[in-house]
Image (cartoon, rainbow, N blue to C red):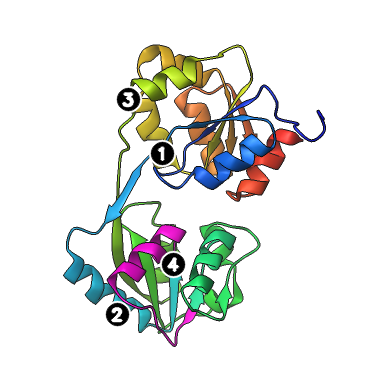
């Protein structure tokens, strides 16, 4: 029985945006763990739908278009039906599946599920004089912009949704402090989420959280977690849920 429930007694803090962590929480429960939903942000449709729709159409008309997340696909579909002759790219398997459900037949995603993985794809290496659309939200690292522009591409942004800090209340703080003796792992795939959470939790809950172990999806986030005060940090292969949980199980 223990082999089938290897996370028994282990708490897993899920920092994905509000409303997007249910499937991962169910996966944690199936492994015997206790999920803590600790959202680092909230997602909402772009305030100016007309401008968002116009920029989305421009992005879809480019030579290639990158959808940065499943949320980018979700909010784009609310604006209009997605059709494009462009090469369609996704940073990971979750976004790739969302695009396939949206009707795209051929969606390219890298083995390494992040911006660096996208930039290493052959289709994005020689882009001088080409137009590349990026569909997502404002903010973020800006790595794709800088690298693609440096390679001579014209980058067209479509901000189809917005990220705002999630409202963490007493329930979230109590969940972090409850059963504090058991192991706590914090799944982290966004520096923005980390900043929002550490700024929102009260002192006792924040200290309890910092006493846990971060599972970070990149070297950049490993450094960010240590800077935030986490003493124990593990590096996952990617932000994919399976890779994050496998890091704990290993």
Marks 3 and 2 in Cβ contact (< 8 Å): no
Dot 3 or dot 2, earlier in sequence: 2
Disc 4 and disc 1 in contact, CB within 8 angstroms: no
Q: Which mark is residue 193?
A: 1
N-terminal-most mark, 4 or 1: 4
Residue occupied by mark 2? 58
C-alpha separation, residue under disc 1 versus residue under disc 3: 16 Å
Viewer-nearest residue: 12 or 92: 12
State the residue at coordinates (46%, 15%): 207
**1 and 3 marks in contact (CB < 8 Å):** no
Is the Cβ of the residue at disc 3 closer than 8 Å to that at disc 4? no
Choose between 131 and 17: the one closer to the eye. 17
Q: Tell me if residue 172 comes above or below residue 95 in the rendering.
A: above
Mark 4, secondary structure of its residue: strand
Q: Is residue 149 above or below residue 3?
A: below
Q: Does 167 lie within the magenta span?
A: no
The reply to whether residue 18 is in sight is yes
Label 4: which residue?
Answer: 67
Tell me the magenta residue range: 68-87
Name the residue tied to disc 3.
Answer: 169
- Furthest residue toward front: 1
Return the x and y of residue 146 as percentages of the image width and height.
40, 62
Q: Using the image as rendered, state which of residue 250 and residue 112 is in the foreground.
A: 250
- Cα separation between marks 3 and 4: 32 Å
At mark 2, the secondary structure is helix
Q: Separation of disc 2 and disc 1 at Cα?
A: 29 Å
Q: CA distance from mark 4 to mark 2?
A: 13 Å
């Amino acid at each position: 029985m223990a082999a089938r429930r290897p996370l028994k007694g282990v708490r897993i803090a899920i920092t994905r945006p509000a409303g997007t962590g249910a499937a991962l929480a169910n996966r944690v429960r199936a492994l015997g763990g206790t999920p803590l939903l600790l959202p680092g942000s909230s997602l909402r449709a772009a305030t100016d739908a007309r401008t968002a729709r116009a920029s989305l159409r421009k992005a879809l008309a480019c030579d290639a278009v990158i959808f940065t997340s499943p949320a980018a696909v979700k909010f784009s579909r609310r604006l209009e039906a997605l059709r494009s002759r462009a090469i369609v790219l996704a940073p990971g398997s979750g976004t790739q599946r969302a695009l396939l459900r949206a009707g795209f037949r051929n969606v390219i995603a890298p083995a390494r599920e992040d911006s660096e993985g996208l930039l290493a794809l052959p289709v994005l290496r020689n882009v001088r004089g080409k137009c590349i659309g990026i569909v997502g939200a404002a903010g973020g690292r800006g790595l794709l912009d800088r690298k693609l522009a440096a390679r001579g591409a014209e980058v067209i942004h479509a901000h189809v949704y917005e990220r705002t800090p999630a409202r963490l209340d007493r329930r979230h703080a109590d969940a972090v402090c409850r059963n504090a003796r058991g192991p706590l792992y914090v799944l982290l795939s966004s520096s923005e989420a980390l900043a929002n959470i550490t700024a929102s939790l009260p002192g006792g809950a924040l200290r309890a959280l910092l006493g846990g172990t971060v599972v970070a999806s990149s070297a950049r986030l490993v450094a960010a977690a240590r800077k935030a005060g986490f003493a124990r940090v593990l590096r996952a292969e990617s932000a994919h849920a399976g890779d994050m949980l496998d890091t704990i199980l290993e």
